[in-house]
Image: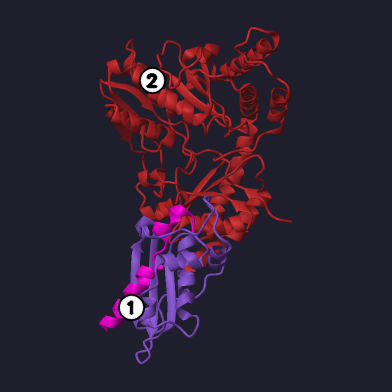
Amino acid sequence: MGDVINTCSDESWFYSNTVKDHFFNPRNFLKSENPPADFNGYGVYGSPACGDEMKVWIKVDPKTKKIVGYVWKTFGCASAIAAASICSEMVLENNRMTIDEAAKITPQMIIDRLGGLPPRKIHCSVLCDKALRLAIEDYNKK
Amino acid sequence: MNKFVYLDHAAATPLDSRVFEVMRPWLEGGVGNPSSFHSPGKEAKNAVETAREAISKILSCRAEEIVFTSGGTEADNLAILGFARANSAAGKHIVISAIEHHAVLESTAQLEKEGFKITKVLPNKDGIIELEAIKAAVRPDTILVSVMLANNEIGTIQPISEIGNWIQKTRGEKQYPIFHTDACQAAGVLDISVEKIHVDMMTINGSKIYGPKGVGVLYVRKGLRLQPLQFGGAQERGIRPGTENVAAIAGLATALELSQKEKEAEGARLVGLRDKLISGILSVVPKTKLNGHPTDRLPNNVNISFLDIEGEALMLYLDAKGIFVSTGSACASASLDPSHVILALGKSPEEAHGAMRFSLGHSTNEEDIDYVLKVLPPLVEKLREMSSVKL
């Protein structure tokens, strides 16, 4: 991920207001243990032992190939939670992304939407794009 | 009113106003360099020597055995690097505990590059370094043993007197090994008489005992040879050259005197609050585990792992409620490694990531503890709800 450019000018610990908003009010996380039965793609990335794990469940409309449902769970720090939350918004907003569009989401796009991340957080906390891609692959295999 | 519940006294304590008053004249007026032979210089020199005298009384040592440094990190570096480099002809083996502060750990890592061998002794599951484990690690070529008096993360109080006594008996007429302890966390609450605890070198700093930051002490028993880390003056017998920080040194001495004088009363008060917080969290929040020994721990230290959640997230949720703590989580450390102390207890990385330290202090009262016990459970609940892990 050497191509990632950080837009967060603050070298300190503190997160942008967007990160804070999504960290304190996370969107679209899965409240129960299991996703709704009609969800048809699942991806998991990272490991709790390393401090960050991301799980993503999606519901793809087979006709339009649009992602009409997206929930996540994470064991992770503030930026992992915020990244998971904003990634779900990016997919579901504006009439929803197709799986092809969603597969093109990069860490850079997530970091930009978050208003940047502290430098040391960039490589470890943006896992949702990988988990999402795995969920799309899982759907495609079915 | 915004809440301000500061529970990170193990990281830094606020400056005691009585300490500040002692420092004030040296910040406002005191111009003299203690090395100058004029009156203002003599005055500054007197302040440094008065402080040295006061500290030596508390440590029951000689004044000339006190070396002032820029803090705990420098004192640990000077003890480990300075002693090892000056005594390498006698042996190149050093024993430390696996739960030392990074100031000791990384000093010994540097020595490894210089050809020394380091043995790290693991604690038992409660975080205590047992004498038997030290005995097993010491070899004929061991020149130095370093074990902290109390751990900074989990607060466990180590059997330093017992280890020191054994080392003294074992070496008999020989010079080695010598015994160093980092007493930064303990200096304000435990007995630090070097005769009673049988140490040859000891580190203390100002910022953990309501004194100023940027000043520390290394006690060095008379006759020990240390190679200085820096050069350019005869101060501190040439072991630590550089113009003395007069205000900070005077402040450190007063801070140590005050905390030692008040340690019984304040310690008893803090133990009550500590145990209330520990039992409160363990009984109200499910899936929590105390790290460290239940009673052989500093009066102000609480360290608990919250399973299934990552510590930085909880720390920042608490921060938003005006509660300031620290975590063993990798995500909140510069190195991105989880706490080496929690891992040394035999706990899983997940438990280390979810470890929170609440360290109490002078300002902490009953109301603060009640507030934490009220605010904490729903925050843990919220993070667990979004967690992908169920341990």
Q: Is residue A16 visible?
A: yes
Q: Which residue is found at the position 49% from the left and 58% from the top?
A: A117
Q: Which residue is found at the position 62% from the left and 31% from the top?
A: B212
| The stretch drawn in magenta includes residue A141 | yes
Main SS type for the magenta part?
helix
Residue B248 position, x and y percent, is 62, 26
Residue A132 position, x and y percent, is 37, 73
Q: Which residue is found at the position 36% from the left and 40% from the top?
A: B124
- Of residues B210 and B286, the one nearer the viewer is B210
The local secondary structure at tag 1 comes to: helix
Q: Quadrant of the C terminus of chain B?
A: bottom left
Q: Colour of chain B?
A: red
Left or right of B361: which side holds A39? left
- Of residues B304 and B328, the one nearer the viewer is B328
- Give the amino acid at mark 1: Ile
Magenta residues, start to end: A117-142
- Of residues B22 and B345, the one nearer the viewer is B22
The residue carrying pointer 2 sits among few (fewer than 14), some (14 to 19) or many (20 or more) residues within 10 Å by Cα, namely many
- Give the amino acid at mark 2: Phe
Residue marked by disc 2: B83
Residue marked by disc 1: A136
| The stretch drawn in magenta includes residue A4 | no
Same chain? Circles 1 and 2: no
